[in-house]
Structure formats: C-alpha cells, structure tokens
Amino acid sequence: MTHIRIEGATKRFGDTLALDDVSLDLAGGSFTALLGASGCGKTTLLRLIAGFERPTAGRILFDGTLVCDAHQEVPPEDRKVGVVFQSYALWPHLTVARNIAYPLETRGLAKAEIAARVGAALERVGLGGLGQRAPEDLSGGQRQRVALARCLVAEASVIVFDEPLANLDIHLRASMVESFRDLHARTGTTIVYVTHDQAEALAMADRIAVMDAGRVVQFAPPRRLYAAPRNATVAQFIGRGALVEATAVGLDEHRARVTCAGATFEARRAGGADGPVQVLLRPEALRLADDGLPVLVRRATYRGPVTEIEATLIGAPGRLIFDCTEAPPLGSSVRLAVADAWVIPEA
Ligand SMILES: Nc1ncnc2c1ncn2[C@@H]1O[C@H](COP(=O)(O)OP(=O)(O)OP(=O)(O)O)[C@@H](O)[C@H]1O
C-alpha cells in the first residue's frame, strides 16, 4: 500500500515539454487512471513513477521517501513497482512459469518456494495448469495475465499499467477489466493505469487524472468528473454530451437559472459570475417534452436499446444529442425538457 506523491514533476525531451509541473497525491491502495489524448504525457508520467525516466524538475516520493528528482533516483528494481505494458514483454524462449518465476530467481529463492508461488499466482489470474506452455501458445488476454502474475509473485506494492488492453478484442477487454478490479480489491496494491479509453477509466479507477498538454487538468473520482467537469476539454473527453452557449443568472452558489435558445432551465454550478457561460447537457438529462429547448432533428442512430438523436438548437448555435426509444422524423422540430445541466467553471 504505497503512497505516491508527485511534486511539480516536469519532463523535457529536447524542445518538447512532455510533463509540465504535475503534482498528484495517490493514496496507498488507490487505483488511479491517467486519461487523455495521445501525446498528453500519460506514459511519461508512468515511466517516471516506474523509474525508467528521471524528471527534469520536481520529485516523486514513495511513502515519504524520495525515489527520484532531477539529480538522483532509486532504480526501477528497487522500487517494488510491477509493470504491465501493452506489448506483453514476456520472454518468448521461456515457459509461462519461468517468465513468472524470473523476479524470484533473481532474488535467489529456493526452487520449491518459487514453484509454489508461481503456481499460486497462476491460479489467481485464472491460468492454473498452463505454466509449461510457451507464451506464443497463449491468447493476448492470457499473456496479459502472465504479466500480471509476474507482478503478483514479485509482491509489487505499486503496479503501473500502460494501455494493457489496447491489443485485445472487446470481450476480452471486459473480462480483463474484471480481473484488474479483482486484483485491486484483493491485494490493495497501489495502481496507476494509463489509458485513452474513458470507459475503462470510469469502470475501474477510484480517481482519474485527466491530462492535456503535459498538465493534469482535473483529478477527481469518476462520478465527479462526469457530473462536474472543470473545463470544456474534460467535458468533451468524458462521456457523451454537448456544450451550448447560454446566459446564467445565479440562484445561489450551487445553482443558476440558465437561458438558452429562448428556453430557461436550472443548472448546477460551482460559483462563478453571472452572464455568458458554457453549459454541459448530457443525453440522459434531456427528454422529449411539450416545452423546453427547441431543436431540429438532424440524425438518428440506432444504438441497441435506444436511438441516439443528434439535433441542432433552433434560434441559437449549438448541436446536442439525446436518446429516445421512438425517433422523431428527421427534419422535425421538437422540444426537450432539461432535467440536469452543468455550468462549465473554467473558460
Ligand atoms: N523519449 C522521448 N523523446 C522525445 N520525445 C518524447 C519521448 N517520449 C515522449 N516524448 C514526447 O512527449 C510527449 C508526451 O508523450 P507521452 O508518450 O507521455 O504521451 P501519451 O499521453 O502517453 O501518448 P500516447 O497515448 O500516444 O501513448 C509527446 O509529445 C511525445 O512525442
């Protein structure tokens, strides 16, 4: 249960500022997802935590002990950090069991002890009995489980994952998400998990750090990120929804009356001045009604139980989406009641 503290971590590669003054406090036993578009700095932050890179400025502490700053670092093998990458990083010429045993062999443990621990780890990741196979005779998901078992035998107190599911098909991804959640629940290992897939992050993490251009834009539990994104980048990255221009008049610190396209509704907010604002409208907060936001139906996409409708506001710029069971005809104008909305705090 290692507590990880990142203080003002900055990393430059030549002219590229990969990380820009990142500070994060990751509680012991927490599951943190680093989420963001390609190139935002997720992998760089992970590599600093694992010990594969040194920061240009700032420092990282494990349980209050310095593991790196610009001048010194504890090497990866001494940090008790397990690593699971997108490419499985298994040795092809070794059996599954030997791949898992490797960290124990380097520690010089007795053969019987190693065999017992490897067997237990294989059972835990659902690969009991497959120890003698070669990695190439396993599926992608099974190879990921081998990498996970290797972290387990090494008794890593921190495990970092870098897009571990990126190569797997959708069903396997779902079952691996379950495995990771189980592993976390049973071991209490501190987990840092890099992904650009928000569904994975929302399903597993107890906190998500949304990154953009080397900075952490928001660090919050999944529900809070979804309900109250700090700026437009986070709002657009997490979940479905639309941002519309509106005018707000505060009711109190937490609520405002918002006018948009001639309709008025209530929105949640975190303080802020009255006047022009951007408002986030999630599809599940919108439903067809006799009164409300006037929109023109542009497109209908069947998504299984519901049809997703894309519509444009009438009398104001803006495009939004909502779900319904019976799609109104394309080109028709309808009205939408707004059950919930959020005023974006930062322009
Ligand atoms: N070794 C390196 N040398 C030069 N530039 C690098 C190096 N590693 C990363 N970068 C640059 O730093 C920035 C952040 O890269 P990083 O890999 O951390 O992003 P990421 O969010 O993990 O992206 P992706 O999702 O595509 O893996 C990018 O502009 C990248 O090109």
Image (cartoon, helix red, strand yellow):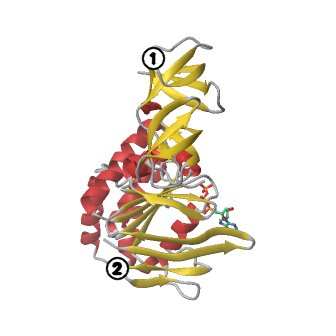
**Circle 2 residue:** 108
Q: Residue furthest top?
A: 329
Residue 205 visible in this rendered orientation of the protein: yes
Between discs 2 and 1, the one toward the N terminus: 2
Local SS, label 2? loop
Q: Nearer the viewer, residue 220 or 197?
A: 220
Q: Nearer the viewer, residue 8 or 314?
A: 314
For the residue with label 2, is its CB less than 8 Å from the closest atom of ligand 1? no
Local SS, label 1? loop
For the residue with label 1, is its CB less than 8 Å from the closest atom of ligand 1? no
Q: Position of residue 102 (x, y in %)?
A: 40, 69
**Circle 1 residue:** 290
Q: Is residue 125 above or below residue 151?
A: above
Q: Nearer the viewer, mark 2 or mark 1?
A: 1
Q: Amino acid at mark 2?
A: Gly
On-image quarter of the N terminus: bottom left
Which of the numbered marks, if any, corresponds to residue 277?
none
- How many numbered marks appear? 2
Residue at (47, 21) in percent of width and height? 291
Q: Residue furthest right?
A: 15
Residue 130 visible in this rendered orientation of the protein: no
Q: Position of residue 182 (x, y in %)?
A: 29, 52
Ligand 1 shows up in the quarter that is bottom right
Q: Amino acid at mark 1?
A: Asp
Q: Nearer the viewer, residue 9 or 251?
A: 251
Q: Is residue 127 left or right of residue 170?
A: left
Crowding around mark 1 (Cα neighbors within 10 Å: few <14, some 14 to 19, many 20+) is few
Q: Is residue 52 left or right of residue 252?
A: right
Q: CA distance from mark 2 to mark 1?
A: 74 Å
Residue at (56, 61) in percent of width and height? 42
Crowding around mark 2 (Cα neighbors within 10 Å: few <14, some 14 to 19, many 20+) is few
Q: Position of residue 213 (x, y in %)?
A: 64, 61
